[in-house]
Image (cartoon, rainbow, N blue to C red):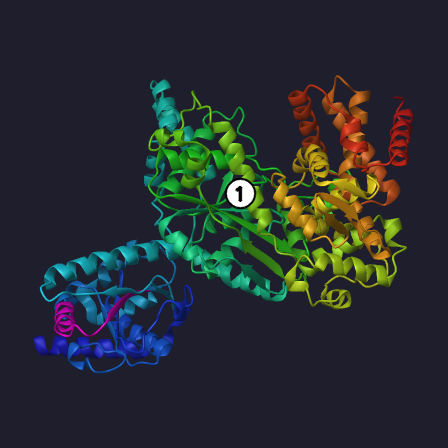
Amino acid sequence: MKFFSSFAHRIAAWRAHRVVHRWSITHYAYTPSKTLPLSAESPCCHLHLYVGLDPCSNLPILAKLCQQMTGLTPCTQTQDLDPHASQIAYVLSYQQQDLKQWRALLQWIQAHPQVKVSVQSVHLHWGRNANALASWPAPLLRYTYAHFSWMRLQHSSGRRLYVQWGRPWPLKLTQNADIIAEVGRLGRFCRWQFHLMRRQLLGAPAPDTARSLSQILTYPPLQADLALHASTPELVQKKLQHYFTEIRAALSWPWIRRFETSLTWLWQTAYQGIEIQGAQDLPSLAASHTLVYVPCHRSHIDYLLLSYVLFHQGLAVPYVAAGVNLNIPLLGPLLRRGGAFFMRRSFRQQGTYPQVFAAYLTSLLARGQPIEFFIEGGRSRNGRLLTPRLGLVSMCVRAALLKPKRPLAFIPVYIGYESVFELPAYLQQLQGLPKRKESLPHLLASVMRLRPPLGQVQVSFGQPLVLDAFLQQQTPEWRAYKGQGIPEDSVPAFWSASLQRLGDELRLGIAAATQAQAIDLLALVWTSFTYTQASQLTPTQLDIVWDDYRGWYPQYAKTSYQDACQASLHPISYTLPDTDLYQRLAYHKNALAPQHLLRAHLWLYLHSQGGQASELATLAALEKLWPHLQAEWPLPPLKLQTLRSTVAACPWINQQAQDYQLLVTDAHQVIGQSLQGLVYATWIRFYLLLIASQNYPKDQQQAQAFALQAARAWAQKIHGPWVDYGDAYLLQQQAQQIQATVAQYGYFSLRGCLQFSGILTRKQRRALRQHVQALLDAHGG
C-alpha cells in the first residue's frame, strides 16, 4: 500500500509539473534580472517557501523560472552539486517535510567552505486573493493530500502566477556551526521575507463583517458614546451598524479580475495606454510601511486608474475613499466591490457618524491596508491643484498615532490626461450653470462620452513622505502621543500647524511629480495670450514661444512645434484655434503654469523698473506677492537660491554682480508677453475682489459673489479662459489670503502689491474700475 501511495504521489507531481507549467500565466511583481545576480565564480543557492500551497507543483515551476532567468539548470538534490562548477543554481522549498534536505544542504555547504553562497527568497502566488486560504475547500486540499494538491490551482485564483524575487543575501557557515540552529534561523528569516512579500502583493486579509464591526466598536470615542447611552445600547449599536454598512467597502477579488479585463480594454481602445513614472521604489516601501496614496483629482476615471496601475505593479489594491454622491444604484455596489468606501460630504451635525468613519479608517490602517483619497476633496474644474482638505489627512495621522503597528507613508501621485471627458461639463459650471447631480442616467451619459481617441494617461508617483520622520522634523513632542492618539478634547499646540504643513507638503509633492505632456506645452503657447493677442501671432512667434517653454522639459528638447501639433489629439496648428478649443486648452495650461510663475513675475518687475533692479530689491518685491500666489498655486516658499537658479535659466536676464538687467529683443518681447499672460488672470481677480470689498465692506460673501460676477463678465468681454475667471473657489482662496495679510500687518497696501511691480498698468486698472462701475449701474448699485 505504501508503494502505491508513493507511486501515485510521483505520478501526481509529474502531471502537475507538465500541466501547471503550460496552463499558468506568469506575472512578475518586478524585474527579476535586477535581483537575481550570479557571480562568475560563486554558486548561488535559491531558497523558496511556498505559502499556502504544497511544493510538488510549484517547485518544478520555480526551477523553470530560474532556468529562464539565469540560463542554468537548477539542482534539487545535494548529490547533484558540483563544488568545482563555476555557477550552480539550487531550488528547494521550506516546508516541514523538506527539513532533512535542508540539513543535508547545509552540511554540504559546511564541508565546502570555498563555495560562496547567496540566498534569495522567491514567492510564487496563484492569483491575488488575500482571503483565498480561508475559503471552504481549503481544508479538503491540505498537504495531507499532497498527491492531489495540483488540483488546488483551479480553485481560488485561476491561471495567474505572480512571482516576487527577494533581495539576495550571503550565507556563511563556520566549521563549528550548529546545523539544526542554522536551519531554524534560515526558516525564520524566509518566513518573515515571504510574509512581507505577501503583504506587499496581496495586502491584509479582510475580516468578515461581524469581526470588522466588533473591531470598530472598540474605538475609544465610540466606547465613550456607548457609555453615555448605556440605558439603550441596542438602539445605539443599531445606529452604529447602519453607519458602518453605509461606509464599508466590500472588496471582491472575482470582481477585481472582471474590472481588470474591462479596464485593460478601456486603456487600449478609448485611451492610448498609460505611462507610469516613479513606481520602482514602491514595492520595497510597501513591504515595511502602510501606504496612503494621495493623488490629484481630475476625473471620475481617477478612482479606477490608480487601482489598476497599482494592481499591475504587483502591489495591493488600495481601499479608496469616495464621495457618497457616487453611491447610486448600479455604480455604488460596483465601486464597493472594487475597494471603495463612502464618506459624506460634511461631518457637521451627523451624530456619531464621524466617529464611526474615523474608526473604520483606523481599522484599515491598523491592519496595514493601503488606502487612497483625494486631498483636494473634489475634482478640479480649473486644472489647478486645489488647496488641501485636511479632514482625511488628520484622521490618518490620528490613526497612525493611536495604533502604530506599521510606519505610515504618504505617496503623492500626479495624474494627467490628454483629454478629460468631463471638461465640457466643467466649463459649463464655470460659466454659472449648476452642477448636475450624479444619477444613473448621468452615469450612462458619461460612459457614452468615453469615445476614442482620448490620448495617453500619465501616472507619476512622487517622493514618499514618511509620517514619523515628518513629525520628528516638526516637533519632538509627537512621540508622547504615539500609542495613545490625539485626544479630541485637548488638542496639543503643535497639531494644527503641523497638519497644515503636512497638507502643504503633500500638495507640493504632487506638483513636483507633474509630468509635462505635449498638450500641456501647446496649451501654454496659445492660452498664455488673450484670444485677441493669439489671433495676431505669426508662425515665427509661435516657434519662439514653443522653444522657450520646451527648454524647461528635457523630454521635448528635440520636439518641434509642428511635430507636437501632429502628435496631438486636438486640431492644433499655426492657425488660431476656435473658441471652444481655446477654452479646453486653458484647462491643460494650468498643469504647468506654476513652474513658470517666478520667471513671469521677474519679467514684470524688471520691466516696470526700467529693465534693471538689484537682487535684494527683486527678492523683496516678489516676497510681498508670493503669499497671494501660494493661495492659488502649489508653490514652495520663495528663497534666494530659488531666485538665483531661475535667473540663471532665463536667457533674457543678464546678471552683473548683484544686479539684474533685462535684455529686450523681438524674440524676448514675445516671450515676455506670453509670461505676462500667465499671471494676469490672478491679479485681475485680485483687483476685482478688492473693488468689490470696498463696495460691500460689511458683507464678504456678497463681495465675493459680486467679484465672481465681474470676473465672469470680464472673461466674456475679452474671450478669456473660463478656468481662470469663472471659479468661485479661486476668489474664496484669494479673499482668505487678503484677510490673513490684513490680520498680520494691520493694513493692506494696494499700491505696494500691484503698482510697484507693474503687474497691472494704470490703464488696465482704470478699465477694470469702469467695468465694475458698469455692472453696479446695471444692477442699481
**Whole-percent x, y for residue 436 in the image:** 69, 41
Left or right position of 328 against 156: right
Instruction: Work out whether 308 lies above or below 493.
Output: below
Q: Which residue is mark 1?
A: 322
Total numbered circles: 1
Give me the residue at 47% from left, 30% from top: 354
The magenta region covers 102-123
Give me the residue at 53% from left, 51% from top: 462
Let me know if residue 453 is in the magenta part: no
Q: Which of the two residues, 177 or 181, is positioned nearer the viewer here?
A: 177
**Whole-percent x, y for residue 244 in the image:** 43, 36
Let me know if residue 110 is in the magenta part: yes
Left or right position of 628 against 544: left
**In this view of the protein, can residue 728 be seen by the observer?**
no
Secondary structure under badge 1? strand
Residue type highlighted by circle 1: Ala
Quadrant that contains the C terminus: top right
Specify the farthest residue to the front: 657
Q: Which of the two residues, 734 or 38, is positioned nearer the viewer here?
A: 38
**In this view of the protein, can residue 733 be seen by the observer?**
yes
**Whole-percent x, y for residue 465 in the image:** 47, 45
Q: Which of the two residues, 565 or 756, is positioned nearer the viewer here?
A: 756
Left or right position of 373 against 84: right
